[in-house]
Image (cartoon, rainbow, N blue to C red):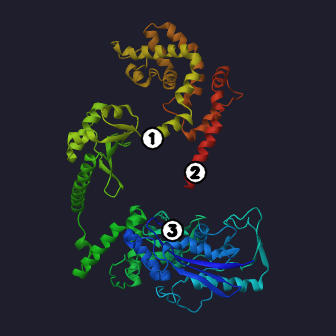
Amino acid sequence: MAYAFCDLQMLRGAGDEYVIKEISLYSTQFDASRGTTIFMPPYAEIILSPEQRKRNSYITRHVHGLTWNSGTVPYEQLGDIIHALLKDYTCIYVKGQEKMRLLLKYAPPGVFLYNIERKGCPRLKALPKLFVSFHGNEHNVFPTHNCAELNAKRIGLWSTAAAATAAALLISEQDAPFATPAGPTAVRVAVPMPPAPTGAGVTGKEAYERLCSGVYLLKNPKPEWSSPVWRSFKVVIDKDTKEEVGAAQCQKCFKCLKYDVVGTGVSSLLKHANSPTACRAPGERADRPTLVPKALKDRLANKLAEKCASDLSSINSAVGEGMSGVVQAAIDIGTACPGAKAADVMPCLNTVRRKICDLTGEGRQVVVASMKEAIADDRCSATTDMWTDENKHYHYLTVTGHFTNSNFEQEPWDLCTPKFPSTQKTTGDDIRSALVREFTTLGFTEEEFEKVEWVTDQGANVVKALEGMKRYDCMAHCINTALKTSLTLSCVELRKKLVDGDTQEMLEFSKVTSLVLKAKETPLRQVGRGVALKALQKSLQAAKKGSLMYGAMLSSVLINQKKVLAVLEFLQANDLAAYVVEHADTARDILSVIKPVDKTGCVPGHALENLHKHFQFCESDSPQVASLKERVQQECELIPILINIKNAKELVTFLK
């Protein structure tokens, strides 16, 4: 049985694929390397993009020293050479999953490929170093560079040393899932038992190397509220396990740094991001930092903390770009005018307000110009909706524009939020007029306004306002409406079931209310002793047509029962007066049952538990109340399910 250790050195191609530059094998049985080959590029370097050339240049300078144009063997012979190198061996050990997958394309049948990292082979940096031997004039090997020949030998020597202190391990075809097919008979290979891996995490250099080779990937940065440093860094994760490896890459200088993935140790990342000498873009000249005493830094940090506490503002507002510009302006003023006090330079409120208006006007011109270009190319849309101030009950109309810029990035901009005129109703025609007026004020023509595509909710007035224009229903509103109506109970449906058998009683009480309200046509200011007709009319509540909302009506009649009877007797409506007296207890029973659902919309989630208890049978229930509760027992069976859905939703929201 023959086995060998193989290593590759690679660059990245135009299609982001791996391009093998060097291959070498090492056999511990003969203590010799063989087949070391450096390949020529598969195509000209000019085909690569500037970013790809820059990445390959970094790999050349910091990883293995092989340039794109180096090599002596045509790349077309790659498959034949690898096949010839591997055919004499039963098992080939490779360090790294990607290298094993590359060799799998060219490995002859019957040869097992095994990732020795699975058996605990430490990273190359932890293996003993060997003397550098030049094996090719074009291979610019330095002590810090990786060489396929030396790496293969180092892995082989580690395996030999491990075999001297550990038992042999049999590997079957099942344990080597990347083995090439060689028939139904499984081949067993004796492999030394390696020691357990040492160390935790990876260094920044190793993370970059594995990132370039495709073993690691980048994922979106963590939320900024966890630390402002994640504005400048992306997290490095393992391609297979999708777990963080304890490294992050700077998006300005593309350098990888190690950090504490378990705790909150991002101080090294913050130090790098704030250092003008360590973090700079390629070709950017480093500025010598100014040494500021720690006491002054602490003083500024305390003032920013006090600002956040007193203004109840976010931390990002205190350490973001805006505040950084304010601090820099203050430093410049202090440099130019030593001894100046804050009161000498602080602007007044009106000055700041005027500056905000000026900046808004300048920004509006840029946005409108970009939107005009987008409208001309049919790549602009807008959303609009109305909302009401709960304090003063003012109506506002909001318009947000959405368009795609030249970099294929979507830009949303809040164009306007004007107060809707109090003299106008929120009808479709009035909303359409307001939209046209606001677009005209911004500088858009009527033709440009009509070319905008809209996405809105299904409000009847908004749909009417945009009639004749391209309009699409907001999917979020549609889903919300569907879930809201299907995963809750409608108050109207519950009332309909509760009062379905008492429609005649409700009609009689409605007649009573209507008659009393119409009594204002009589010339009398008072009806009987102690009955103020005008005050009584204000107290009575009529049932809304078609809404089945009888609770307020019954409650007002029962509260003012004596006054209502006096008015009915004065109007000689003795039959209605007798009806009120006879059915007063029935009205109280109906009112006690329907009161929790005598409202519009649906039952809110927080009221489901109380509603479920309300509709449970009690020993003290009258026959009338028990009969009413019986009508909604089918809906009561759904309430526990809806409560569980509500709790699950709250749990998901909390976990987010």
Of circles 1 and 2, which is in front?
A: 1
Q: In the rendered image, which residue does mark 2 sit on?
A: 652
Give the quadrant of the N terminus.
bottom right
Q: Which residue occupies 33% across, 58% down? A: 407
Q: Is residue 649 above or below residue 284?
A: above
Q: Is residue 84 above or below residue 565?
A: below
Q: In the rendered image, which residue does mark 1 sit on?
A: 475
Give the crowd class for mark 2: few <14, some 14-19, many >=20 residues within 10 Å. Answer: few
Q: Is residue 567 above or below residue 268?
A: above
Nearer to us in this view, 495 or 589? 495
> Contact (CB < 8 A) between labels 1 and 2?
no
Which secondary structure, mark 3? strand
Find the distance from the CA under tag 1 to the CA under tag 2: 21 Å
Q: In the rendered image, which residue does mark 3 sit on?
A: 235
Give the crowd class for mark 1: few <14, some 14-19, many >=20 residues within 10 Å. Answer: few
Residue 122 pos. (x, y %) = 64, 80
| Kind of residue at badge 2 | Val
Residue 221 pos. (x, y %) = 48, 65
Which secondary structure, mark 2? helix
Give the crowd class for mark 3: few <14, some 14-19, many >=20 residues within 10 Å. Answer: many
Q: Which residue occupies 57% across, 48% down? A: 650
Residue 27 pos. (x, y %) = 67, 83
Q: Is residue 71 above or below residue 18?
A: below
Find the distance from the CA under tag 2 to the CA under tag 3: 25 Å
Upstream in sequence: badge 1 or badge 3:
3
Residue 158 lies left or right of residue 353; in this view the side is right
| Kind of residue at badge 3 | Val
Which secondary structure, mark 1? helix
